[in-house]
Amino acid sequence: MNVRLAKALAAVLVAGLLVGGCAPATAPSSGGGDDKTTGTLRVWLFDEPNRAPKQRVIDEAVAEFTAAHREVTVDVQYLAVQTRSERFRGAFNDPASAPDVVEFGNTDLPEYVAAGGLADLGADVDGWAEGKDLGPDLRASATTDGKLYGVPWYLGVRALYYRTDVFAELGLTPPTSQEQLVAAARKIRAAKPDLFGLAVGGKYTFAALPFVWDAGGDIAATSGDRYTAAINSPQSRAGIKAYTDLIKPDNCPPQQCADLTGGKTVELFASGKAGMAILGNFNRTAVEAGAAKGKYAVVPLPGTTPGSIAPAFAGGNNLGIMKNTQRRTLAADFLKLLASKKYQQQMYDAMGNLPTLTSARTELAGKEPFLRPFLDTIAAGTRFVPLHPGWGKIDAQAVIPTMLEKIVTGQATVEQATDEAATAITAALAQ
């Protein structure tokens, strides 16, 4: 199931199937208590490096919701993504303090379902007029053991942002192969020592994985429904070496880049301190708010074969309802409002989040050239992490970032670090 699900997600991204709208929920409360229609609805959403654009959209949705529900207030809390696992585990263990509606990463789904924290949304979607727009493949991406536990809110992939002014000054053209990418990065660094050529970080998992996948490697391999680590395969090691070789003085020095995260990479490029960076469509707002505004363009991240596109991680977030909510109907109403076409479009305008509704994406693709590199990346084929509850442990323990950091700081060879990571991955996926 897991392999099929990962492939299905990529297929869905190409097809652009999805949901939206707002209608009354029909599902009964699953929390075991009263389905209250008044009081405070508690909502947890992810925080952002620049929260203001997202918060403006959410504030408008809250105002619309409370205008239609006069005896309801909505308490929105923004969670730091890095500490979300601890907050969710606390909520699962203490239902009285848990929220009603939650945003969570699609990689979090198996772990949260295994913990028994999320409500089955099948009846809500089946009874929702726009639920028919949720295609079977996309529905599968939020389904575990035959039950739907999330409504996809947005999807995101990463591509290569580059400084057009720097490229013009140095006579560079956008790279169409990994070899050209590396050469351009080193040329920028040599000509402009105040810039990183290509900002790459030891703690930036989703920048490293395209190199692994492009080399034919993977995090883990499957046999039926069982996973075993593949991060130490020859193919994976080749991809990891290609990535970690970029964290060197001639491009991105280890002293500054070994602990570089995805968020810090966004900040570096936005502030004009990098010639290139691997960023998501959802990072556009942050880049536009910095010194790089008006001085950048985007192309797909190239693969080793000239003209190819490296596989990108098919990321995205879902909206869900906590199993023990006492305001089941209100929670479903609010969830559907946020998942509507209106607010998906506003979230794209505010954050660059790729809409999941077919109609919203079709409209945007026709008038937004910025989306083309990301849509081309999706069409070329995306990849996913293991859809297994153990992925949460792998992520929380920073298994892949630790592996990368040990290599780039000289604490371990590629072989030693990948073997160590493989042991941790196999153990996590065996549970």
Image (cartoon, rainbow, N blue to C red):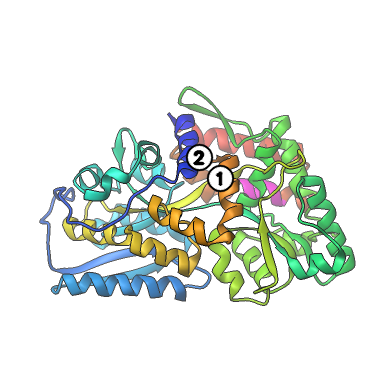
Judging depth in this view, the residue of 160 and 94 nearest the camera is: 160
Magenta highlight: main SS: helix
Q: Which contiguous range is marked in magenta?
A: 400-405
Name the residue located 87 percent from the left edge and 60 percent from the top edge: 187
In the drawing, does residue 13 fall left or right of residue 266? left
Whether residue 403 is in magenta: the answer is yes
Q: Is residue 268 magenta?
A: no
Quarter of the image for the N terminus: give it. Answer: top left
Q: Is residue 75 above or below residue 81?
A: below
Residue 94 in the image: state x and y as whole percent: 27, 56
Which one is in front, 31 or 20? 20
Query: How crowded is the residue under tag 1: few (<14 C-alpha within 10 Å), some, or many (20+)?
Result: many
The kind of residue tagged 2 is Ala
The label on residue 378 is: 1
Q: Does residue 247 appear to the left or right of 370 in the view shown? A: right
Tell me where residue 353 appears, x and y as whole percent: 48, 60
On screen, residue 79 versus residue 404, left or right, reads left
Location of residue 277 in the rendering, given as x and y in whole percent from the top left corner: 69, 60
Q: Residue at x 77, y 44 (%)?
A: 242
Q: Position of residue 244 (x, y in %)?
A: 76, 49
Element on which disc 2 rests: helix
